[in-house]
């Protein structure tokens, strides 16, 4: 399909002509991307079931996520939904504008639009182009954000072109969207409303009209507890995601600066004026306490990260009140809810190949210096203990028979399947790593509350799991292969072959050393206690 790309500038057609052409596409069941005051929308007729199907397919969106129906005037909701007094009170104040209200639907709205729900989302956009298209086409318009599913919503026509070229009939370029984040979505209750998705119409603004306003828990918490069974792990709560992994960093700018300093292959998402003080690539996302500016810039910043080709982005944590709630809501999803606090206990990463003596080093270090110890391998065992919810997820992917009759995990059977191919290992890690990370971070927070100033995050697969990205710095315990081989054979009473195969499954010593900030030599003639001092020196250097 060839996608027409038209600007509302009068360059090729005058504005009325562009709108007329777009309206005909809508009437004939086609799709047009249009600007709105929030983000670009992918518009199709809300009365033609096949238009909705085309929208899902162009976006690659799961068909169980309902669309918003856009109307030109609040009273047009009457044909589509059962309205009430609150609807009109809110409409009077906020329509047209960035507010979407969920109401019980009427029969005229196809199930395809509402994903089979008995409610429908109604919004009356203020953007002139969107507004006129609805009027001229004579159709209510179903329009989700015009991005490919899972990535940030488009705030410029070029973003839409990147995502939708060749997949839809037309893109209307109406310039940059004013707000930059999607509309506030509320569900009307008997005497008030619940905010399902925060936006530019804030809780305080809604409260002026109807005092009974609450905020759904899912706005700032994962929609499903990470370890719960979900249909497609990771997908339910990861949205707006660039390819780079996003980590939100709470705390003072000074501690943030120290944390990111010297980190490789990463970028900063920081506030205006901060980038020049950092020694890593950066994108500024508005002034520090200016939530509206941040809302305006966030999605474009997330998209630009991919052009920079970095692996990790460290985002400064925005204010979370007013419009800030919408900003943090999107950022949390982009970050899959990974938040670290650089004003809290410093996270020191420790790793080492099997037989390197990592456990010995961890124990001595923590005992001698009163550092808290978090053992990620123990967390991995804990979350896969008998009858845990993670087992159900693993069984869904690797086969029910990896669970034994007593509800415990057959670790050998899982290992045989999960390590049979790179793809299988990736799936295992995709389930395990996010849960381990969230559990580990919860433990870090608890230690911070206890007043600890440093925690040792001890993980064999620290680099493979990308847990190193959470750490202020990482240390690797190193010993020659022959030494490690002897230690493993002795420790586990296993044959040379078995010990070698275990060692072969891990990164080489050189790879560990290359990735780490500090290397400790844990073999004769080195003195282990003196080597451990290297970690303390690095800690002090980072703390200065
Ligand atoms: O600002 C916006 O709202 C943009 C522009 C284009 O209007 N549209 C937009 O649509 O963000 P979309 O599809 O990306 O997001 C719609 C949100 C989804 O979270 C969806 O689950 C929710 O609204 N939604 C739609 N209908 C619903 C319903 N009947 N019940 C509950 N949630 C609903
Ligand atoms: Mg969307």
Image: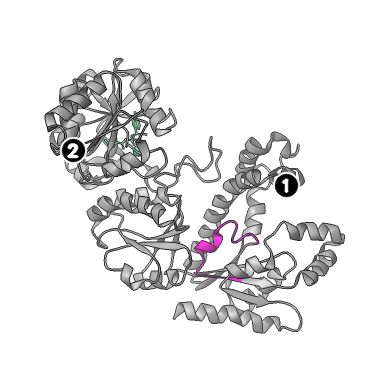
| Residue drawn at 73 percent across, 35 percent down | 401
Q: Nearer the viewer, residue 503 or 28?
A: 28
Give coordinates of residue 395: x percent, y percent: 66, 38
Mark 2 vs ligand 1: CB below 8 Å: no
Mark 1 vs ligand 1: CB below 8 Å: no
* Circle 1 residues within 10 Å: few <14, some 14–19, many ≥20: some
Q: Does residue 134 appear left or right of residue 194 in this picture?
A: left
Give coordinates of residue 99: x percent, y percent: 23, 37
Which secondary structure lies at badge 2? loop
Give coordinates of residue 509: x percent, y percent: 68, 68
Query: Where, quadrant-wise, is the N terminus in this rendering?
Result: top left
* Circle 2 residues within 10 Å: few <14, some 14–19, many ≥20: many
Which secondary structure lies at badge 1? helix
| Residue occupied by mark 1 | 415
Instruction: Locate ligand 1 by image quadrant.
Output: top left
Answer whether residue 465 is magenta in the image: yes
Q: Does residue 74 appear left or right of residue 185 in this picture?
A: left
| Residue drawn at 30 percent across, 23 percent down | 30
Instruction: Tell me if residue 349 comes above or below residue 107 in the rendering.
Output: below
Give coordinates of residue 78: x percent, y percent: 20, 20
Task: Please report the bounds of the magenta region as a residue range.
Answer: 460-475
> Looking at the rendering, which quadrant does residue 53 occupy?
top left
| Alpha carbon separation for disc pair 1 and 2 | 54 Å
Looking at this rendering, what residue extends furthest in the top direction?
A: 107
Answer whether residue 169 is magenta in the image: no
In terms of sequence position, does the residue under pointer 1 or pointer 2 come before the other? 2
Which label belongs to residue 324?
A: none
> Looking at the rendering, which quadrant does residue 18 occupy?
top left
Q: Are marks 1 and 2 in contact (CB under 8 Å)?
A: no
Q: Nearer the viewer, residue 181 or 227?
A: 181
Q: Nearer the viewer, residue 141 or 33?
A: 33
| Residue occupied by mark 2 | 97
């Amino acid at each position: 399909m060839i996608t027409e790309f038209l600007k509302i500038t009068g360059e090729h057609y005058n504005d009325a002509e562009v709108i007329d052409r777009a309206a005909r596409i809508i009437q004939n069941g086609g799709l047009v991307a249009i600007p709105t005051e929030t983000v670009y929308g992918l518009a199709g007729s809300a009365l033609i079931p096949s238009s909705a199907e085309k929208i899902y397919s162009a976006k690659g969106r799961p068909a169980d996520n309902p669309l918003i129906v856009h109307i030109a005037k609040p009273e047009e909701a009457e044909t589509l939904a059962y309205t009430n007094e609150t609807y009109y009170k809110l409409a009077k104040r906020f329509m047209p504008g960035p507010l979407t209200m969920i109401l019980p639907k009427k029969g005229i709205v196809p199930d395809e639009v509402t994903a089979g729900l008995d409610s429908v989302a109604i919004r009356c956009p203020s953007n002139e182009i969107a507004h006129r298209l609805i009027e001229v086409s004579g159709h209510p318009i179903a329009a989700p954000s015009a991005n490919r599913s899972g990535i940030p919503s488009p705030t410029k026509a070029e973003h839409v072109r990147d995502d939708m070229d060749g997949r839809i009939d037309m893109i209307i370029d109406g310039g940059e969207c004013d707000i930059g984040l999607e509309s506030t979505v509320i569900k009307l209750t008997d005497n008030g409303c619940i905010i399902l998705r925060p936006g530019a119409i804030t809780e305080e603004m809604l409260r002026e009209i109807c005092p009974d306003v609450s905020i759904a828990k899912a706005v700032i918490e994962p929609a499903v507890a990470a370890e719960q069974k979900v249909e497609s792990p990771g997908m339910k709560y990861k949205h707006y995601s660039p390819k780079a992994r996003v980590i939100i960093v709470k705390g003072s700018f000074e501690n943030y600066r120290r944390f990111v300093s010297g980190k490789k292959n990463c970028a900063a998402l920081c506030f205006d004026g901060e980038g020049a003080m950092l020694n890593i690539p950066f994108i500024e996302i508005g002034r520090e306490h200016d939530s509206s500016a941040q809302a305006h810039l966030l999605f474009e910043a997330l998209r630009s990260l991919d052009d920079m080709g970095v692996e990790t982005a460290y985002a400064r944590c925005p204010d979370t009140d007013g419009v800030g709630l919408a900003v943090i809501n999107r950022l949390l999803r982009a970050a899959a809810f990974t938040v670290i606090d650089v004003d809290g206990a410093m996270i020191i990463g420790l790793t080492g190949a099997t037989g390197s003596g990592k456990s010995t080093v961890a124990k001595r270090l923590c005992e001698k210096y009163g550092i808290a110890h978090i053992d990620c391998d123990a967390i991995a065992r804990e979350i896969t203990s008998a009858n845990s919810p993670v087992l159900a997820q693993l069984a869904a992917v690797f086969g029910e028979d990896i669970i034994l009759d007593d509800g415990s995990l057959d670790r050998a059977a899982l290992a045989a399947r999960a390590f049979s191919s790179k793809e299988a290992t990736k799936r295992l890690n995709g389930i395990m790593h996010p849960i381990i990370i969230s559990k580990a971070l919860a433990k870090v927070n608890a230690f911070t509350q206890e007043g600890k100033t440093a925690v040792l995050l001890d993980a064999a697969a620290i680099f493979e799991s990308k847990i190193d990205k959470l750490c202020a710095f990482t240390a690797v315990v190193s010993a020659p292969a022959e030494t490690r081989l002897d230690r493993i054979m002795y420790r586990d009473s296993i044959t040379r072959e078995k010990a070698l195969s275990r060692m072969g499954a891990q990164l080489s010593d050189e790879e560990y050393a290359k990735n780490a900030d500090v290397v400790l030599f844990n073999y004769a003639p080195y003195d282990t206690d003196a080597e451990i001092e290297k970690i303390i020196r690095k800690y002090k250097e980072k703390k200065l």
